[in-house]
Each structure stands twice: as C-alpha cells, then as structure tokens.
Amino acid sequence: MASPLRALAGRVPQKWRRRVPAPVRNRLVERFGHPAPPFDLASHPRRLNLGSGWDKRPGYLNVDLHGFHRPDLVGDVRSLPMLPSGRYEEIVAQDVLEHLERDEVPPTLREWRRLLAVGGQLWLRVPDLLSLADWLRADDAPDRHRRVMQLLFGTQAYDGDYHHAGFTDVLLIDELHRAGFGHCELELRDDWLWEGDARAVARGSGPNVSLAWGHGFYRREADASGATWRWGEHEANLLVYCDAGCELGLELPLLNGEVQVPGAGVDARCALASPPCVYASPPEPTGSASSPGPARRRRATTATSASESAGASRG
Ligand SMILES: C[S@@+](CC[C@H](N)C(=O)[O-])C[C@H]1O[C@@H](n2cnc3c(N)ncnc32)[C@H](O)[C@@H]1O
C-alpha cells in the first residue's frame, strides 16, 4: 500500500476496522501490511525537538522533515498545525533555523512561539556569521576556507541539509523578540555558534532585555551552590538588547574566586529601571542604552581583582 494510503488506513478507528469481516481484513493485511499506528499526541511529552535529525532525544517529541531519521513525527517545522497552541514547555531547535529560507525565519519563529506556553523555553543554536568571517580573515589556508564554507552553507548531503539563512547575535535576538520571545541569553560555542535560550513572553508584557556574551567571554559555569559566573578576558564583547524605549540598568560585578566562586569571573544582572539610567560605571556622554530598537555593541572591560567592579563602557 502506498504510504499515504497506509497512513490514512491508520486513522480509521479500531471499532470501524472490526466491522470489516476478518477474512477480508486478513487479506488486506497480507497484501498491504498493517496500517500505520495513528499519531497520538497525548502519548508524547510536552517537549519538542524540532529538526531532530539523528539527535533523537528521549523525553521529547522528535520532529524532522525526513522519515529516514526515524523521528516520532515526520513534519515540517515551519508549520505544525497538528500540534496544539501553548501545550509545550520546551522546544529544542539545534542547528535548524539556518536551514530555512531567510523569509521563512520570522513566520517559523512565530509558529514555535505559538506552540509554547508563556514562560516556555526555546533553546537553539545557529552559526555566527561574524565569527566565521573572522576565521576566514585569520587564516589563508585553502583547506581552512573550504571547511568554513561547509559550516556556512551546510553539508548539503540531502534536501533540508542546506543553509539558507545567516545570523549574527543582533539579528537572531531581534527576530526572536519580534516573534514574541524575550530574555534571550546567547553565548558563543566553539568560537562559531550562537547557542542559548529565549523565553516565550506574553504580548504587551513590557520591554525585555536580552544578552549575547561574545568574544572574550567563556561559557557559563556553575558551582554546587547554584552561583554562576563566566571567565572573561581583559576585553570582551557583550551585546545588550532591549526592544523598546526604556531605562536600562546594567551591573557587571567582577567576581574573585577567593571571595565568591572557585575562579575569577564575571556575571551580569540586567534590569529595567525607572529614570535615571543606572550604570555600574558612568555612561558615555553620547548615545544611551535607553534608545529603542537595534542593540548597541559594547565592549565590557573586565578585570580579575575582587575589589574592582566595572560596567559596560563603549569600546
Ligand atoms: C544539521 S541537522 C541538525 C540535527 C539535530 N538537531 C542535531 O543537532 O544534530 C538539520 C536537521 O533539520 C532537518 N530539517 C531541515 N529543514 C527542516 C524542516 N523544514 N522541517 C523539519 N526538519 C527540517 C533536517 O532534515 C536535518 O535533520
């Protein structure tokens, strides 16, 4: 039986199937095989792994375009009408968004936002265009450039394995905010991927702030007490993004291992504050973090002495 027919047969309720006389049923099964089991939403968890590929995760509904990956659901992550709105607490979309055409990114993010409950988490990873450009600039070896092209444009082994969209921290966070996400926190992984999470926010819930820890910062670490920090070089890039006019307070406490955590590091707290704008160090005379719209790239100067603390200063 052709697979759509088999899938259709799978949707015929058991009690109706029993009305077909057993000898006829047996002959049909002999000829076409058993009908595909119907997709039962209730038997699947409230976590989605979209574009799962070979990374099939237990505890998730794994969705992929291709049956050969053996996902729980063969589907197109751009539109998943079979999945109900607001049901899911987490979506993982690792190395997927860049596989969509550029114009499809905003509606796809809105579709993912539809699936999440308010407060739900979208965890994603995409290549960072600027890091890869730096790799090209830093090394003239053709093999190195060839490798970067694969990272930029995808392995291209099959349909769905091509990259059609590129991202920077600014662009990714802006698209996420426009689609109804906020409080994103991204960090660079392996020096070429933006990886992190975003929360599904309620419409009209007010401005929210997102961060991207760029070059010069390292991945977040945590100790047993739950304290978190990250290592920072003397100069490092931190992107602070707010999608609406607001006064922004940014604190970058510099931590010293002997005092607070087992290692010197830097952590940030971001808060929307009522005027006046509060900085841990004086703001620059021109420009202001309170401007709406596009984020401003800042270079955070870090130091490892416990007694020092620094705010963001324009680099
Ligand atoms: C680079 S792989 C990533 C797989 C997996 N998430 C991981 O991290 O290993 C990209 C996956 O996205 C899937 N994909 C691409 N476009 C898709 C679409 N529109 N709908 C569903 N899956 C898609 C591909 O089939 C492929 O399995």
Image (cartoon, rainbow, N blue to C red):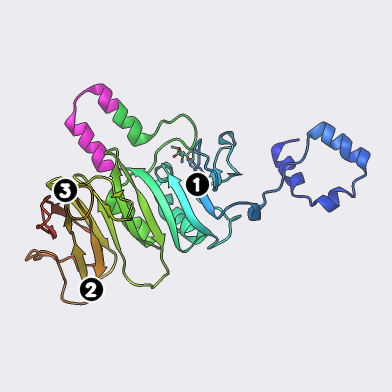
Residue 273: numbered disc? 2
Write down the residue under mark 1: 50
Q: Amino acid at mark 3?
A: Ala
Task: Please state if 210 lies on the left or on the right of 314 as rendered.
Answer: right
The reply to whether residue 294 is visible in this rendering is no
Indicate the position of residue 219 as horizontal and vertical percent values. 28, 46
Local packing at callout 1 (Cα closer than 10 Å; few below 14, some 14-19, many 20+) is many
Distance between the alpha carbons at the discs numbered 3 and 2: 25 Å
Query: From the image, which quarter does the N terminus lie in?
Result: top right
Q: Amino acid at mark 1?
A: Leu
**Which residue is painted at 14% across and 52% down in the image?**
299
Nearer-N-terminus badge (2/1): 1
Write down the residue under mark 3: 236
* Ligand 1 lies under 8 Å from the Cβ of mark 1: yes
Magenta residues (range): 128-146
- Residue 277 falls in image quadrant: bottom left
User: 94 or 270: nearer the eye?
Assistant: 270
Residue found farthest to the bottom: 275
Q: Is residue 266 magenta?
A: no
Task: Please state if 109 lies on the left or on the right of 1 as rendered.
Answer: left
Indicate the position of residue 56 as horizontal and vertical percent values. 53, 40
Indicate the position of residue 88 as horizontal and vertical percent values. 52, 58
- Residue 31 falls in image quadrant: top right
Tag nearer the camera, 1 or 3: 3
**Which residue is painted at 11% across and 47% down in the image?**
234
Distance between the alpha carbons at the discs numbered 1 and 3: 32 Å
Local packing at callout 3 (Cα closer than 10 Å; few below 14, some 14-19, many 20+) is some
Give the secondary structure at mark 1: strand
Nearer-N-terminus badge (3/2): 3
**Which residue is painted at 48% across and 55% down in the image?**
90
User: 289 or 88: nearer the eye?
Assistant: 88
Residue 21: numbered disc? none
